[in-house]
Amino acid sequence: MIIPLHELEPNQEADVFALLSEKEPAKTKEGKPYLWVTFRDARRAIRFPVWSDAVIFKEIKALKTGTYCKLRTTYRITSRGPHLEIHRIRAVEEADTSDGLNPVLPTPASAEKMFEELQTAAKQHLGKAPLHQLVTKILKEYRNALLFGVASRQHHHNYIGGLLEHTLSVTNIAIALVDHYHEMYPEREQNISRPLVVTGAILHDIGKVREYEPHLGSHQHSVVGELMGHAILGRDIVREAAQGIELDPVVQTHLEHIIISHQRFPDWGAAKPPMSLEAMIVHHADSCDALIGCCWNIFSQDSTEQGMTGKKNVLGYPLLVPRGGDT
């Protein structure tokens, strides 16, 4: 029976179709050769080492990056993270289509719906103002990149459609925060601009459509992405799209500040810390969603039954494993 890679449970053995999206030769300190490989489908990417003394080492070494493969494998969770214990592997064949092989990593079915929800949020909160024209123009131009993009390579929303899912979630969180503070302090409602918050949330990560470039089913940093980072690239996209739109220069500068400051810290990629209420709201909405996304990844990669995850994860400390039914 064929099981989608992203549906494999720890210690489950099954046949899967997966794309060999990365293959990098390496050596241990003692000079022992091995391969770093990544197999993925639309919702999961698993990166792990294949040692030279493994039975399938020569077979994997002979496969070209970008090859769709049929694997008999067992999904393991190790102290180093997720691992595929591969028993058999070969390149897919035409006959495999009868078993459900689709040689294209599809965008999740929910992506189109999320894109529509993002457009609806823009229309509802931005009306016909220049900011709405700006958002509509950018969403139209980068629609496919958003549908197929990832929000990160490893830490959170690191699957096709993840960038769009993260963007919509951040937008909804930011709107909820604006609603809260407008209701909490109605006399200060004018101090927080809903249009700027919504526009900033929708566009905070738009630079990732240039920071990452799809490569044979994987997502690598582009050269410009490595040199500039997505915050600066996002500001550039806004500047390009703003041409021909009667956008108030002060509003545009404020929007650009939200984008370049949303990561807050220089070593995270921020050129400036958030220096306005709107920028603070977008930053915290983004930080919250990214952190929860990291937690989902950790839970899916940790098979402990001790109530707490291990501490070898991106956060560096253990997490309480959720238990259904707790009050």
Image: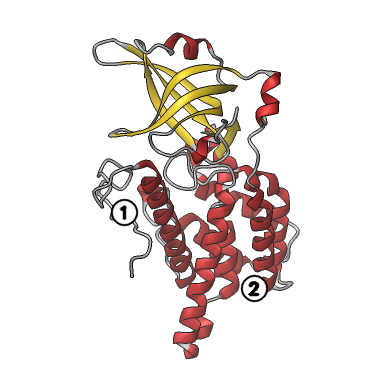
Tell me the residue at 69%/53% (across/down). Answer: 112
- Work out which quarter of the rendered image holds the C terminus and state it: bottom left
Left or right, residue 131 beside residue 178: right
Residue 161 percent location from the top left of the image: 59, 47
**Count of all numbered marks drawn on residues in the image:** 2
Residue 267 vertical placement versus 46 (above, below) = below
The answer to whether residue 38 shows anywhere in this view is yes
In the picture, the quarter occupied by the N terminus is top right
Q: Is residue 253 visible?
A: no
How far from the left and from the top, in percent, is residue 87?
A: 44, 19
Q: Secondary structure at mark 1?
A: loop
- The 10 Å Cα crowd at callout 1, few under 14, some 14 to 19, many 20 or more, is some
Q: Which x, y percent locates residue 123?
A: 70, 69
Q: Are the residues at dot 2 and dot 1 in contact (C-beta closer than 8 Å)?
A: no
Amino acid type indicated by mark 2? His
Which of pointers 2 and 1 indicates the residue nearer the eye? 1
Q: Secondary structure at mark 2?
A: helix
Q: Is residue 136 left or right of residue 209?
A: right
Which disc is residue 260 wearing? none
Give the spatial CA distance, label 2 vs label 1. Answer: 37 Å
Q: Disc 2 or 1, which lies upstream in sequence? A: 2
Residue 125, numbered label: 2
The amino acid type, in three-letter code, at marker 1 is Val
- Residue in the picture at 62% in, 66% down: 249
Depth order, front residue of 246/147: 147
State whether residue 264 is above or below residue 124: above
Q: Which residue is under mark 1?
A: 321
